[in-house]
Image (cartoon, rainbow, N blue to C red):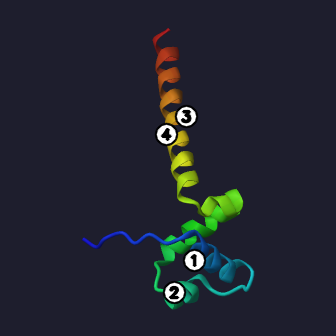
Amino acid sequence: MERKVKYDYAFKLRCVKEVLKKHQAITIVAKENDIGKTSLKDWISRYQEFGNKGLLPHLYITQKTRQGFVQKKEVILQNKNTQQ
């Protein structure tokens, strides 16, 4: 199993802008920068949803954690309503 590579904010932003601002294909940008297409697509999605802050690792974790919390709370509320 390969070790996960972490990319810094400036690198992610540069790659995202190459796709969005310079209209280069995701495949080409990924290949030129030796990164996975899926990673680049994820960065683009987070950038489009949250702006520059979406490329910072702590925001992604916070959003993911918040979504998990909301989902758990919904399940608990559904279970309570079903029992009544």
- Residue 47 image position (x, y, % from top left): 66, 64
Q: Give the number of the mark in front: 1 or 4.
A: 1
Callout 4–callout 3 Cβ contact below 8 Å: yes
Spatial CA span between label 2 and label 4: 32 Å
Q: Earlier in the sequence, mark 2 or mark 4?
A: 2
Residue 33 numbered mark, or none:
2
Q: Is residue 51 above or below residue 19?
A: above
Residue at label 1?
11
Tell me the residue at 54%/41% (across/down): 67
Identify the secondary structure beneath mark 2.
loop
Q: Secondary structure at mark 4?
A: helix
Residue tagged by mark 4? 68
Label 3, secondary structure: give it.
Answer: helix
What residue type is disc 3 on?
Answer: Val
Q: Does dot 1 land on a helix, a strand or a loop?
A: helix
Q: What residue is rendered at 49% in x and 40% in y?
A: 68
Q: Nearer the viewer, mark 2 or mark 3?
A: 2
x%, y% of residue 28? Answer: 56, 89
Q: Nearer the viewer, residue 83 or 39?
A: 39
Determine the residue positioned at 45% across, 12% down.
Answer: 83
| Dot placed on the residue nearer the N-terminal end, 2 or 1 | 1
